[in-house]
Image (cartoon, rainbow, N blue to C red):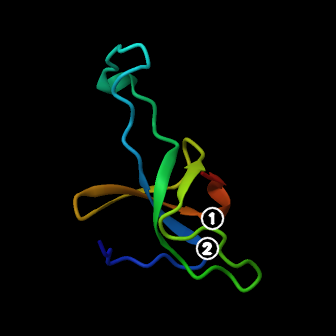
Amino acid sequence: MSLNIKPLADRVLIEPVAAETKTASGIIIPDNAKEKPQQGKVMAIGKGTKDEPMTVKVGDTVLYGKYTGTELKLEGKDYLMMRESDILAII
């Protein structure tokens, strides 16, 4: 799938994974008690800066801070736009 958005500089477009709907023991979590996801898939990246090339690539699964990034809605899906420095790890 091709998105019509190209992040600039060191920014990354991430599609968050769906929040868990059940606990490991089978208890169903209501919508108002769900945790904000902290994991997602990289959908698009910028070119980086002249001092720092990009480390992540499209398709990587990454961990990021709970309240980082700017929420976007593109083509009916939710995405996050954030700087590469806000990404904590590549899984």
- Indicate whether 76 appears above or below 9: above
Element type where label 2 sits in the image: loop
Query: Residue 64 vs residue 49: left or right?
Result: left
The residue under label 2 is 10
Name the residue beneath numbered marker 1: 84
| For the residues bearing labels 1 and 2, Cβ distance under 8 angstroms | yes
Which corner quadrant of the image does residue 1 belong to? Answer: bottom left
Which residue in the rendered view is the most extreme toward the left? Answer: 76
At 31% from the left and 76% from the top, the residue drawn is: 2
Tell me the residue at 60%/45% (across/down). 65
Residue drawn at 68 percent across, 81 percent down: 49
Image quadrant in which you'd find residue 23? top left
Checking the image for residue 73, the label placed there is none
> Tag 2 or tag 1, which sits nearer the N-term?
2
Between 18 and 9, the residue placed more toward the observer is 18
**Other-residue count near label 2 (Cα within 10 Å), few / some / many at <14 / 14–19 / ≥20:** some
Rendered position, 22 above or below 87: above
